[in-house]
Image (cartoon, helix red, strand yellow):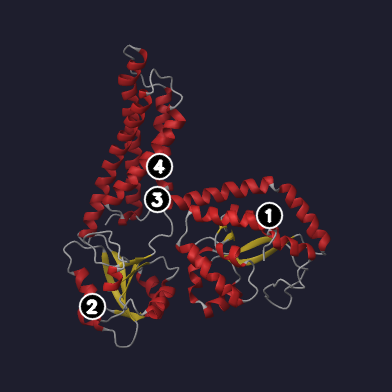
Amino acid sequence: MMNRRVLVAWYVLADLVSSGSAWTLFYLYRKTVLEPIKFGHEVAVAFDTNYFKGLVLVPLFWFGLFTMMGGYREIHRRYRTMELGQTLLISFIGVVIIFFVLLLDDEVASYHYYYRSFLALFFLQFGLNFLLRFLLTSRTVKQVHDRRIGFNTVLVGGNERALAIHAEIEGMRKSPGNRFVGFVNVNGGDQLLTSVGLPRLGKWNELRQVIGQHAVEEAIIAVDSGEHEHISRIMNELEGTGVRIKIIPDMYDILSGSVKMTSIFGAPLIEVNPSIMPAWQFSLKRAIDICASALALIVLTPVFIVLAIGVKLSSPGPIFFWQERIGKHGRPFRIVKFRSMYADAERHGPQLSSTSDPRITSFGRWMRKTRMDELPQFWNVLKGEMSLVGPRPERQHFIDAIMEMAPHYRHLHKVRPGITSWGQVKFGYAENVEQMVRRLKFDVLYIENMSIAMDLKILAYTVLIILKGDGK
């Protein structure tokens, strides 16, 4: 089995070679075919400075584009139809960018020159790039089918369903890639898998330790899909582990369209949220975060100065309020806000604020209504601790309280927390844990439906709240 980093290096090399070759062939095509049409006579082929600049910069551009679009992610799980679609899309986007940046200002005899240039570059880039990627991906797919590459898999449950899916996958001539390391039982009686030599690794609530000990990459939940309570508890236990979660479907799931096949050789399984957003949208979201927060910190400097003066005059104490919150993957960070409460407001311990909270200053109350107290968090966004849009980060004290009522809160740690969120737009500041749990529903829905379009809608509603000053 080829090491993941080595395989990524092969893909990178293939992209650099194919894009460099495509650029060279395109340069020759222009010199031998297009320029003679433009000038009306043969043109001497000479590799000038522009060619050599392109030979360096163009492959680097394609490498950056493939990186942004997720072309080097989950390298052992790529398949040929995925490679075709992704390479086609990336080639089109990249050629459009190159065309407008490098080729559109060419002096031409006819607009047909542009069409021929665009099509030539596109077919050369796509053809060479896809050919090399197809060969690499075919080799990887064959190794998966031959069981030379496998993904450590644990079965959750040891009942008849687990026994059947284990036998089905193990009996396939072309393996889908599952390498079973053992199972965990959900109740005392479901241990049938021991009869086929699969070891019991513990109980379902010990999944996190099992995953760490056995480097598990996939978990197949062999519990009846109608047993929602069991499945919910198991999925909460798996949340944040990075493990791919699959569920054995029943006939209702199949008829309702829940089962989506990605491989004709694989067993019919429901894959739970394999990816929140396409890789290119994550890259674009982060790029928007960086550009918008940097611009905001510069443009809003006069506003920051006015707000700082207002805070200082409202009551004694510091201008900024720093507090530890929990971010992506459960990592703590220090959030910064304009201070809206009197100093030492939490000397008696963590407390949530309310609309009539006496700890809030009069100026702080106005800032909260207009969300102006949140503006310094553009600094957290720039540092990568937060995003413009995402679930609001909470303190560990309140996360513990929420988890007792809603264990699925852990889903929120999949993504960076945000300055604003769907839950924030709907509810504003929560006044108690019950409201935090109610707001949680909207934040979970946001994560399951994340997109750049959704972020833009939430930002638009946030701007309306700021302009109207009716934030809660």
| Percent coordinates x, y for residue 219 in the rendering | 34, 70
| Percent coordinates x, y for residue 62 in the rendering | 40, 40
Q: Nearer the viewer, mark 2 or mark 1?
A: 1
**Residue that badge 4 annotates:** 63
C-alpha separation, residue under disc 2 versus residue under disc 1: 60 Å
Q: Earlier in the sequence, mark 2 or mark 1?
A: 2
**Residue that badge 2 annotates:** 163
Q: Foreground residue, 390 or 252?
A: 252
Decide if residue 25 is on the left or right side of residue 234.
left
Q: Earlier in the sequence, mark 4 or mark 1?
A: 4
- Classify mark 2: helix, strand or loop: helix
Residue at screen point 75% across, 67% down: 341
Q: Are marks 4 and 3 in contact (CB under 8 Å)?
A: no
Q: Nearer the viewer, mark 4 or mark 3?
A: 3
**Residue that badge 1 annotates:** 467
Decide if residue 251 is on the left or right side of residue 118.
left
Decide if residue 415 is on the left or right side of residue 62.
right
**Residue that badge 3 annotates:** 70
Q: Is residue 220 above or below residue 128?
A: below
| Percent coordinates x, y for residue 398 in the rendering | 60, 75
Q: Is residue 395 above or below residue 119?
A: below
| Percent coordinates x, y for residue 355 in the rendering | 71, 71
